[in-house]
Image: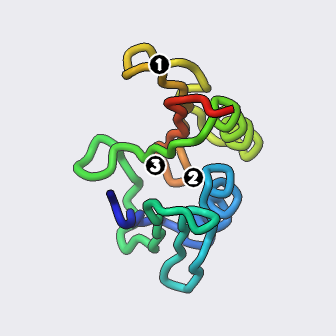
Amino acid sequence: MLGHIGLNVADLAQAQAYYDALLPLLGFERFLAADDQCAYKPAGGKPGTYLFLYPAADPTPYSPDKTGLQHLAFMVRSRGDVDLVHRHVLSVSGEVIHPPRVFPEYPPPYYATFWLDPFGIMLEAVCHHDRD
């Protein structure tokens, strides 16, 4: 299991505001905020991977085509949660890559939405087994 993931972002304050609103929908809560980083952990004391955000020293825009992170996927409990995240992304004028749908090309059942965060990092909310 991964302990944590660290993402470099062009604007830490903007990233914190964006992820403070998004990550509770994905089951995370912020536990650290400082001038040089902020971090989120699974909510309610659940085990899981932590997410750290750091200010990037190099402002070069993110590219999923370069070596490194291609995208970051968050598992949610239900298709309804995928839809909720999608509505949130639309409400903040996010760039949607794929609206919520079944992806038959992936191992079933795979219901997901993909979008870009403000820095161009592709994110995904996915439900493998609807628990509603």
User: Dot 3, crowdedness within 10 Å: few (<14), some or many (≥20)?
Assistant: some
Counting residues from the start of the chain, the first of labels 2 and 1 encountered is 1
Q: Mark 1 points at which residue?
A: 103
Label 2 SS = loop
Look at label 1 and name its amino acid. Answer: Phe
Q: Residue furthest right?
A: 91
Q: Mark 3 points at which residue?
A: 121
Work out which quarter of the rendered image holds the C terminus and state it.
Answer: top right
Q: Mark 2 points at which residue?
A: 118
Give residue 40's mark.
none
Look at label 2 and name its amino acid. Answer: Pro
Q: In this view, does 122 lie to the left or right of 20?
A: left
* Real-space Cα separation, disc 3 to disc 1, in angstroms: 20 Å
Q: Is residue 97 among the parts visible in the rendering?
A: no
Q: Which of marks 3 and 1 is in front?
A: 1
* Real-space Cα separation, disc 2 to disc 1, in angstroms: 25 Å
Q: Nearer the viewer, mark 2 or mark 1?
A: 1
Residue 116 placement (x, y as % from top left): 53, 43
Residue 31 placement (x, y as % from top left): 59, 76
Q: Is label 3 in contact with label 1 (beta carbons under 8 Å)?
A: no
Label 1 SS = loop
User: Dot 1, crowdedness within 10 Å: few (<14), some or many (≥20)?
Assistant: few
Work out which quarter of the rendered image holds the N terminus and state it.
Answer: bottom left
Q: For residue 19, which quarter of the picture?
A: bottom right
Q: Residue at x 67, y 38 (%)?
A: 81
Q: In this view, does 12 lie above or below 111?
A: below
Q: Which residue lies furthest to the left in this view?
A: 67
Look at label 3 and name its amino acid. Answer: Ile
